Image: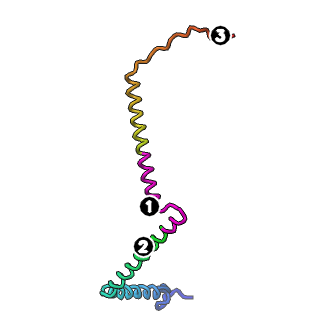
Amino acid sequence: MSNKPDDGASQDPFEAWRSFLTEAERNINEGLSKAMATPQYTAASQGVLKALLQSQSTFQKMAKRYFETVNLATREDMAAIAERLDAIEEALNRLERDSATTAKSRSAGRVTATKPRRTRNSSISGK
């Protein structure tokens, strides 16, 4: 066997495929860009978007009715509960801060009282 180069046979066997895909992608992109620039495409895409939004709205209304029928909480119900819970937590935090502040001010103003002396002998228990 000789080590002389072939006339193109030693090239990458997938080069033709790569160049075909590159050219095909370029042609498809050009064609779609031209098609998207037409007013018909704009009208059609607006119609599709309008239909999708309408179907989404209908689905949401039907889901809400279903949840009400089976007595389950909807997303809006859960959001309202979360807001109320946040408000309750904030109120509790505020009360804790106020209570801690009040306790500190009371303890700072209070003079420590001395305990009275114990006069009863602890070794003597009641009969």
Residue drawn at 49 percent across, 69 percent down: 63
> Dot 1, how many residues are within 10 Å of its Cα: few (below 14), some (14-19), or many (20+)?
few
Between 55 and 14, the one lying in front of the other is 55
Is 55 displayed left or right of 46 in the figure? right
Q: Decide whether residue 122 is among the magenta residues.
A: no
Nearer the observer, disc 2 or disc 3?
2
- Estimate the spatial distance between the alpha carbons at disc 2 and disc 3, rounded to whole Å: 84 Å
Quarter of the C terminus within the rendering: top right
Q: Which mark is residue 11?
A: none
Image location (x, y in percent) of residue 13 = 50, 86
Residue marked by disc 1: 76
Q: Can you give x and y, in whole percent of width and height, for residue 22 in the image? A: 41, 85
Which stretch is magenta?
A: 65-89
Instruction: Look at label 2 and name its amino acid.
Output: Ser
Gap between marks 2 and 1 measured at Cα: 15 Å
Instruction: Report the residue marked by disc 2.
Output: 57
* Secondary structure mostly seen in the magenta stretch: helix
Instruction: State left or right for residue 103 relative to residue 13.
Output: left
* Secondary structure found at label 1: helix
Residue at the location (52% across, 86% down)?
Answer: 3
Residue marked by disc 3: 123
Query: Dividing the picture into quarters, in which one does residue 50 lie?
Result: bottom left
Is 81 covered by the magenta stretch? yes
